[in-house]
Image: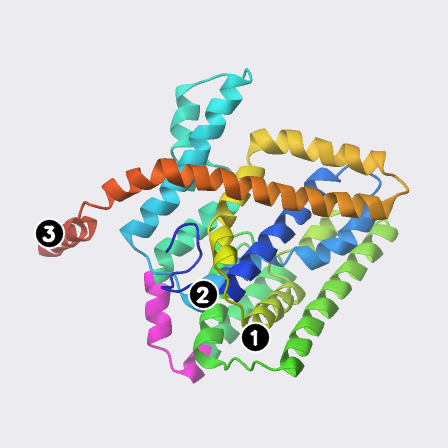
């Protein structure tokens, strides 16, 4: 796994890198809506547009499956060092602003895969660890068997999870949903052809738009009928919603069907995960989202101005996050390089051999 990337590739394909940038832009706008406008008068109407943005997380995992995760010590250390760096950074910043420092907080900042509070990081780390086994399953499946596997997982996801809210996958914020999406991504890569035609691209983007519009209409209907808000996040916006997954697949297929190669896009896309870690950190969020709420109140009656402001602010968050991460790389890359001088694979193999002989 390359640095903060969700797949490993010698030459990054810029159409997928562009997709990752667009998805992070979507995630920021999604957070503006569900966190920032939570108590404003705009939330009800903005939830309609949320239907277009909420697919982003699913798209990231589909990309991971498409290229497959190559679990390695090098990939682990890159992911860990980045996450731990920002954990420690914001601990220092929060203490500087008067927060209480404790040994517990220091330890938790160094345990990003279990104590960071980022549900996505936890689930992605689980997927990272499971990927060798998942790849083994995929590599030993015929196309017919693979389709059967996806049908089986669809029952678990849509019937047991989405419809009946079973514990196995009730809203999609879990590794079970990530595995399902990972399998879908691998199936697209291995068993579908990339038809680069205007007609196909039109179909993909129309499917995405249609699913997003239906999701938005359902959201407005629930709101105007004064139904409990839990219906929104249980049956309209969960990541395991059939509409959400279909929309995500169509969006990924659309970007797969375009051909772009650009070094600047690739350079920026290396830091998309850092943008997530930066803007969703509790210290930043406690200041950013109240500001978003104030904007919603201030521009009441001026929706177009608010939309423009949000787009500009989301782009600014991305640019600042990318630049901060480039500075972080200068600091942590030498550490990472020294750690990787150790032959961790050899030590791992020795440990396995000893366990076998017990």
User: Closer to the camera, 295 or 33?
Assistant: 295
Left of 232 or right of it: where is 299? right
Find numbered disc 3 in the image and state the secondary structure of the residue it sits on: helix
User: Closer to the camera, 337 or 355?
Assistant: 337
Circle 2 is placed at which residue position?
Answer: 65
**Alpha carbon separation for disc pair 2 and 3:** 33 Å
- Residue at the far right in the pictured view: 301
Q: Residue at x 42, y 30 (%)?
A: 108
Left of 213 or right of it: where is 132? left
Q: Residues within 10 Å of mark 3 (few under 14, many from 20)?
A: few
The answer to whether residue 5 is magenta is no
- Residue 264 location in percent, x, y? 51, 55
Circle 3 is placed at which residue position?
Answer: 354
- Residue 199 location in percent, x, y? 66, 82
Q: Is residue 196 visible?
A: yes
Q: Is residue 171 visible?
A: no
Residue segment shown in magenta? 132-146
Which mark sits nearer the N-terminus, 2 or 3? 2
**Alpha carbon separation for disc pair 1 and 2:** 17 Å
User: Closer to the camera, 336 or 87?
Assistant: 336
> Could you say which quadrant of the image residue 37 lies in?
top right
Question: Which image quarter is the N terminus in?
Answer: bottom left
Which mark sits nearer the N-terminus, 3 or 1? 1
- Residue 21 location in percent, x, y? 56, 55
Circle 1 is placed at which residue position?
Answer: 257
């Amino acid at each position: 796994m390359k640095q903060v990337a969700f797949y490993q590739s010698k030459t990054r394909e810029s159409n997928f890198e562009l997709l990752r940038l667009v998805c992070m832009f979507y995630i920021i706008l999604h957070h503006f809506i569900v966190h920032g406008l939570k108590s404003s008068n705009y939330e009800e109407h903005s939830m309609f547009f949320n239907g277009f943005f909420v697919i982003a997380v699913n798209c990231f995992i589909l990309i991971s499956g498409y290229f497959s995760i190559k679990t390695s010590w090098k990939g682990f250390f890159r992911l860990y060092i980045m996450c731990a760096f920002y954990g420690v950074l914001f601990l220092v910043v929060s203490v500087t602003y008067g927060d209480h420092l404790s040994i517990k907080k220091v330890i938790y900042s160094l345990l990003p895969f279990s104590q960071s509070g980022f549900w996505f990081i936890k689930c992605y780390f689980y997927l990272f660890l499971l990927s060798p086994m998942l790849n083994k399953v995929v590599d030993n499946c015929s196309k017919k068997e693979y389709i059967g596997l996806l049908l089986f997982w669809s029952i678990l996801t849509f019937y047991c999870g989405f419809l009946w809210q079973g514990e196995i996958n009730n809203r999609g914020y879990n590794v079970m949903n990530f595995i399902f999406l990972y399998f879908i991504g691998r199936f697209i890569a291995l068993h579908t052809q990339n038809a680069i035609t205007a007609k196909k691209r039109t179909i993909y983007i129309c499917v995405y738009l249609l699913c997003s519009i239906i999701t938005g209409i359902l959201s407005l209907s629930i709101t105007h009928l004064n139904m409990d808000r839990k219906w929104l996040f249980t049956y309209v916006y969960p990541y395991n919603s059939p509409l959400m997954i279909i929309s995500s697949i169509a969006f990924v297929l659309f970007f797969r069907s375009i051909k772009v190669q650009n070094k600047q896009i690739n350079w920026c896309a290396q830091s998309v995960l850092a943008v997530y870690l930066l803007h969703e950190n509790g210290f930043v969020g406690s200041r950013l989202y109240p500001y978003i709420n104030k904007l919603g109140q201030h521009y009441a009656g001026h929706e177009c101005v608010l939309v423009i402001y949000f787009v500009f602010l989301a782009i600014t968050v991305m640019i600042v996050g990318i630049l901060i991460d480039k500075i972080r790389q200068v600091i942590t890359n030498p550490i990472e390089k020294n750690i990787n001088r150790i032959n961790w694979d050899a030590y791992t193999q020795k440990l396995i051999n000893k366990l076998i002989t017990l």
